[in-house]
Every structure is written in C-alpha cells, then in structure tokens.
Image (cartoon, rainbow, N blue to C red):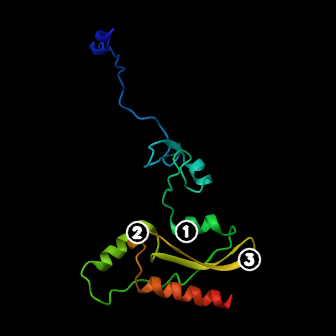
Amino acid sequence: MLGDLFTKPKKRKYATIPSDGTKADVPEGIMTKCPECKKIMYTKELQKNLMVCNYCGFHHPIGAKARIDMLVDEGSFEEIDASLTTANPLGFEDYMDRIEKDKQKSGLNEAIVTGHATIDGNPLVIAVMDSRFRMASMGSVVGEKIFRAVEDADKT
C-alpha cells in the first residue's frame, strides 16, 4: 500500500506528427492574442467589448481617435487646434527625431487630441490623451491644447 506511493511513473510514448512548416492562411488583424491571459479571440469581438478581454478583463490600449469614436455620436467629432505642434525651445539634440518617430508611430501631431462633438445630441468639447506619443507626457503644446479646450468648453 505505502510502496505504491513511491513507484516511478511509467514513461509515456508520444507520436510526433510532421509539419510542412507552413502557417495557416489567416488574414492579418482577424485574431488578437491577449497579452495577459494569452487567449486568442476575434478582433471584432474584442472591439465590440470596447477592447476589454472577454476572458480576463485586460484592457487593451486604445488610441485617442479610436477612444473618441467609441464615446461620441458617429460623425460628430471635429478636431480643433490640430495644427499645433511641438517645438524644441531648449535645444535638445535628438528631441525632434524622437518627436518624428512618435508622429509616425501614433499618426498624431501631439499627445492629445481635442475637438467638438456630441454625445446623445448634447454638444461638448473633448480632450483625449494618447500614450503612443511621448507616453502622453505634458509638454507646452499639450498644456496649450487643454487650456484652449477648457476655454472653448466654457463658451459652449
């Protein structure tokens, strides 16, 4: 009886199925793997759930423009102050190169997007930060855009 506890387990035999090395032809963007629970889900289902994993509740990153699209009435958003861009008044050597990389990565000119929109027909001014641009750090342009958005909202 006690001797059964200390017996070596039998070695299992496994069959190896050869692979031809090709991956399945799944179009890019159809599936998304959750970085938290590692489960794979349809990207459309993830988007319907507002980018929150159905399995573990992980919140996937959302860009500023996608977040605005989720919040406001369809077609109501009009961006303001889009032409404001970062300068380099302190003369940091590679700062403008890093800004250019952030612009390419995020598709934005700055770490914040501001504009007019409606929610259920009610007008509003919205400001949304985007962490893909300088980790949404607040520089002079971000501060200026927030200031202008607050002033604009006060008039609305």
Give SS at disc 2. helix
At a point 32% along the width and 74% down the height, the residue shown is 98
The N terminus lies in quadrant: top left
Image location (x, y in percent) of residue 117: 66, 76
In this rendering, which labeled residue sits more in front, label 3 or label 2? 3
Task: Report x, y in % for residue 105.
Answer: 41, 66
Check the image and name the residue furthest to the right. 121
* Circle 1: element type: helix
**In the image, what residue type sits under mark 2?**
Gln
Q: Which residue is mark 3?
A: 122
In x, y percent, where is residue 33? 46, 46
Question: Which numbered dot is residue 65?
Answer: 1
Closer to the chain start, of discs 3 and 2, is 2
Q: Secondary structure at mark 3?
A: strand
- Which residue is located at x 52 percent, y 88 percent? 147
Seen at 43% across and 83% down, the residue is 85
